[in-house]
Amino acid sequence: MDVDAYLGLLAVDGTLVNVGAPAEPLSLNVFSLLTGRRSYAGSMIGGIAETQEMLDFCAEHRIGADIELISADQINEAYERVLASDVRYRFVIDTTTIG
């Protein structure tokens, strides 16, 4: 993975977050960080056991996410709403409508 290329896509003060561990060691040019005051961060998302524990906790405590379910043919409209800041909940595409 060319980390420098991805860092170059970030805005000034942007952060690229690596979720999980890459299979191979990564290298990057420090100037990719310095020239735009960019940051490179990491996050361990946990394995299957931790994910299941979190889902069980949410189910037990009736914690859920507020979403707006859309069909695949509403993607362009949803994107326009994102651009217009007219979104209250996360869009989730109903995968049964794809195809």
Image: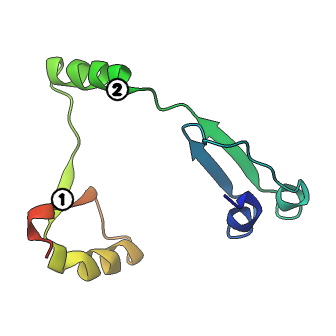
Vertically, is 45 above or below 41?
A: above
Q: Is residue 43 left or right of residue 56?
A: right
Q: Is residue 21 left or right of residue 78?
A: right
Q: Secondary structure at mark 2?
A: helix
Q: CA distance from mark 2 to mark 1?
A: 26 Å
Q: Residue at x 41, y 26 (%)?
A: 47
Q: Position of residue 20 (x, y in %)?
A: 54, 37
Q: Secondary structure at mark 1?
A: strand
Residue depth check, mark 2 versus mark 1: number of the one nearer the observer: 2
- Residue 42 in which image quadrant: top right
Relative to the observer, which residue lies in front, 90 or 86? Answer: 90
Q: Residue at x 23, y 41 (%)?
A: 65
Vertically, is 95 above or below 58?
A: below
- Residue 85 in which image quadrant: bottom left
- Residue 32 in which image quadrant: bottom right
Rendered image coloring scheme: rainbow
Q: Residue at x 82, y 53 (%)?
A: 28
Mark 2 residue type: Ile
Give the tally of numbered discs.
Answer: 2
Residue linked to disc 1 = 68
Residue linked to disc 2 = 48
Q: Which mark is residue 37?
A: none
Relative to the observer, which residue lies in front, 41 or 37? Answer: 41
